[in-house]
Structures are given as C-alpha cells and as structure tokens.
Amino acid sequence: MKHLGRVMAIVLLAVNACFTAMLLFSAYSPAVQPVVHPVRSCLGLAFPVFGVINACFLVFWLLVGCWRMALLPLAGFVCCFQTLRLYCPLNLPSGDVPEGSVKLLSYNVMGFANGQLVDGRNPVLDYLASSGADVLCLQEYRTDFGRGRLSQKDVDRALKDYPYRNVMRVGKARSSRLACFSKYPILSARLVDYDSRYNGSVLYELQVERDTFTLINNHLESNKLTRADKEAYQDMLDDPRADNVKHGAQTLLRKLAEASAIRALQADAVAREVEASPHRHVIVCGDFNDSPVSYAHRTIARSLNDAFVSSGCGLGISYNRNKFYFRIDHILLDKSLKAYRCVVDRSIRSSDHYPVWCCFGKRE
C-alpha cells in the first residue's frame, strides 16, 4: 500500500506538472503572433481554467501534507503573477475622486438594444443620459430602425448635455458605426487605417481644458460566432461528453483563431497610432473582442495602463451572453493619467455587453 501511495503521488505530480506548464503557456501566449500561430494565440482564453486547476492542486497538496509537492503549483502562480493581476486585479476601494477628473464611459450598445422602446423609452439611452459621464464612447451605434423604434431624434433629445458629437461609419460594408458624445470639444475625428468589413477604430482629438487628448474608440474584429456556434458551446458546457466537447471545441477554436489573426493586424495599427500621437495624453477604449490575456490587449497596452487593472477589482466580466465569461471591453490610459474607480457596471443587461467606466485625472 505504501508503494501504491508513492506511485499515485508521482502520477498526480506528473499531471500537476502538465497543468502548470499549460498555465505558463497560456499566461505567455500574448507574445505569440496570431498571424503566424493563430491557434496558439488563443491559448490565453484558457488561462482561468488552468489557473483553477492549479489552485485545486495547491490546496490538495497542502491538505494531504505534501508541502514539497505544493511548491510546483505555487511556483507556477509566482511565474505568472503579472498575468494573474491582469486577469483578476484586487485593488482596495479608492478614496474620493479628485475634483476636475474626467469620467469616461465605453459601451457596446448593441444598436441601443436593437432600438427597442419600453413605454416609449429605451433603457440603454436612459442609462447613458443618467451616467454622469463627460465622454461617451459607443460601439455598434445604430438609430435607423424605422417607425416605432429608437430614432436619432430620441438620442439627440436624451443626450442634449453633450454638445460635441461624432458618429462615423466603419468597415468596408459601412454598416457599423462608432460614436463619441462629449462635453469637451472634439477637434478632429478620423478612421484608423486597417482592413475590416464590419469593424473599425476612430481617433479623436479632444480639447480638455488646456490639454489636447488623443482618444481612440475601437470595435476590433468580432469572432463571428453564429447562433449555432453559440448553441454548440452551450451544449458543450451543459453536457460535457467527449463527442460534444470535441465538436464544439473544434468549431470554436477555428473561428477564434481566424478572428485573432485579423485582430492582430488591427491591434498593430492602433498601437502605431498610440506611438505616433503628438499629444502627451492618450486614451484607448472600446470593445476589443479579446480578453486581457491576448495579443491585441498586450500590443495596444504596450505603453499604456489598463484602468481596470490599476483601479478595478475582480474579473470584470463585460460580456453577458452565452456563458462567455470574459472581460473584452477595456479602457487604457497613458502613464501621465491616473485612473480612479474603474467599474464594469452590471446594473444594466439590455445590451450583450456591460458598460465600462472610469474617472481619470492628470498625475502630479
């Protein structure tokens, strides 16, 4: 029995070593160029899964008194500490937001919940009007629904406190729009040059007091998962049989890899705009369609700070459909700015995304 126990311990240690290796591979997968290795670049999506498994091993080794064995999963967590903090920051609540701070809200409004009106009102539009934000960056902006649904006049009336606004079509199909509503003057607006049929990024110059800010609003390449794909993913979670998992995983991985490769080129283009900005203050926000552990996030945030990582708390899941539990909406600030109270607001579920907002001010 004693020898059998040793064999079991060795087998479990070997399994633990495999999962620790996968944890590290997923943590450092953002360094992989998706155009060259599209499938490997998607490994970051599995980071929380490998993290949970390694945490279970750590607890197990401690409970059975195998302290030396526990060093393996512990070493794995130490080696990917920065990725752990990026994925799930744990910040204490900050104090009062300094006077003069700017509140920015980024929200994929899903066409204002497809323009639906409830008793003549639209919940997404009501949320925006009462948000108290100084700048609204909106993705999937749409108001051309026709009679009986939300119109541009409704938006203009509800958001009358935002005298400066820009709505721009993006993508070759010209069917998708990005919008910026601001209490500060928008000096200019132009598209970021990259290839996409339905997605895009818009660069604005904002006059905030005496400073000019570069603000880039993004809706990077969608994963283009059909309803059937999402149902297959749901089935895979609800009924994790081998055939369900194999079929669902193959379909999802292929589409995620294709989108990741396209997004990589878009992220490179946005990063070049950040580097080339003539202004000291730069903000990048929007729907990245990618998690914090991704090439797109890593590339764009190369010289920026993630507002949620520096002032938020928890997982900050921003997509709220089909059990895709990821933070794919981000606000990034250059190092001359400090974020306060970055929040993924789960109080409204009208869109398939939650709004993300933070206050920021200039560092002393």
Image (cartoon, rainbow, N blue to C red):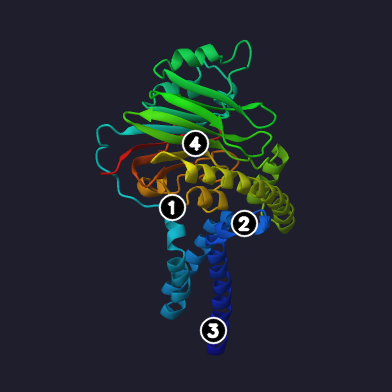
Q: Quadrant of residue 194?
A: top right
Q: Which residue is mark 3?
A: 5
Q: Counting residues from the N terminus, which is met first, the one under dot 1 or under dot 2?
A: 2
Q: Which residue is mark 4?
A: 216
**Which amino acid type corresponds to the residue marked 3 in the rendered image?**
Gly
- For label 2, the crowd category at 10 Å Cα-Cα, with few meaning under 14, some 14 to 19 and many 20 or more, is some
Q: Amino acid at mark 4?
A: Ile
Residue at figure coordinates x 44%, y 25% from the top left = 186
Residue carrying label 1 = 88
Residue 12 image point, x, y percent: 56, 76
Q: Position of residue 81 (x, y in %)?
A: 43, 62
Looking at the picture, how far across and down is residue 23, in whole percent? 54, 64
Q: Is residue 58 above or below residue 9?
A: above
Asked which quadrant contains residue 141, the reply is top right
Secondary structure type for disc 1: loop
Query: Which is more N-terminal, label 2 or label 4?
Result: 2
